[in-house]
Image: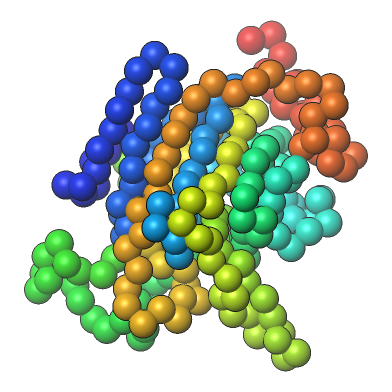
Amino acid sequence: MTQTSKNYHALVNDKVYRTTIPGASHWSTMIRKGTQLNIKDLNGGANLAMLFFNPYQLDEKYNAPDTLKCQHTFKLTQGHCLYSDMGRIFCSVIEDSFGWHESVCGNSHASHIEKQFGKRDYQTQHNQWLQNGYDSFLVELAKYGLKAQDMAANVNWFSEVSSDDNGNLSLSRQSQAGDNVTLRFEMDTLVVMHTCPHPLSQAAEYPKTPIAITLSQADHVAMNDACMNHCPENQRGFENNALYHFGL
């Protein structure tokens, strides 16, 4: 687990792991099957971008088109599952106070940040420079031997987008302080994340909003589980996971 800021703090015991990811930072960790991850916007206006990989087969990764298509949705919220490109389920959204999270707009790049907030690079501004999401992901991916070509469409938690009559997307709503989402992991998953601004952000100043992270043991999946029974496709996804874990 990698420290990305002097403001980074962590607390570990035998049942719960808590830490805070500062704004404009990046982090990654492997989350085991049966673990739940709660992410919480501490100050309001956060954006938490996230990618998912199979840690034992890194070319298996999050598939945004299949995730949205098979659940007949444009947004992610409670009851939805996040799929890999092998038809397996990385995790399920079991709690959500915000109600809308997007997975179509991707990452902020250096050009987005410079256009909206001005150019401030590390060479001249040091720790006051303005990071972008794309490069933040690249730093974390490199730790696992992954490169730009391994990147996929990511989830942007706490960011709602809407379209106008011409189909132009805009960032229409972000979370308030205290909003949170809980993900239950259905297989071992490498999770890569950053807290850089959403690519459609129109904020007057570069947002540096921290995210609280809590890892704990999830309850077992019951037969009446809302995520598994959200649609027939999700039931098949859980069956694919069961086959993947058969014999373990």
124 versus 37 height, above or below: below
Q: Quadrant of residue 239?
A: top right
Residue 135 placed where, x, y %? 34, 61
- Whether residue 41 is visible, yes or no, is yes
- The residue lying toward the viewer, choosing from 93 and 90, is 93
120 versus 219 height, above or below: below
- The residue lying toward the viewer, choosing from 56 and 97, is 97
- The residue lying toward the viewer, choosing from 17 and 67, is 17
> In percent of the image, x 20 and y 76: which residue is there?
120
Query: Which quadrant does the N terminus fall into?
Result: top left
Query: Which quadrant does the C terminus fall into?
Result: top right
Residue 238 placed where, x, y %? 77, 29
> In percent of the image, x 69 and y 51: which residue is there?
77
Residue lying at the far bottom in this picture: please name it.
Answer: 166
Would you say 71 lies left or right of 53 here?
Answer: right
Would you say 105 lies left or right of 143 here?
Answer: right
- Whether residue 144 is visible, yes or no, is no
224 versus 151 height, above or below: above
Name the colour scheme. rainbow
Residue 195 placed where, x, y %? 39, 57
Q: Quadrant of residue 134?
A: bottom left
Q: Quadrant of residue 212?
A: top left
149 versus 130 height, above or below: above
Would you say 106 lies left or right of 115 here?
Answer: right
Would you say 65 lies left or right of 48 here?
Answer: right
Residue 114 placed where, x, y %? 31, 81
- The residue lying toward the viewer, choosing from 201 and 40, is 40
> In percent of the image, x 32 and y 78: which residue is there?
205
Residue lying at the far right in this picture: please name it.
Answer: 232
> In percent of the image, x 32 and y 57: which residue is there?
23
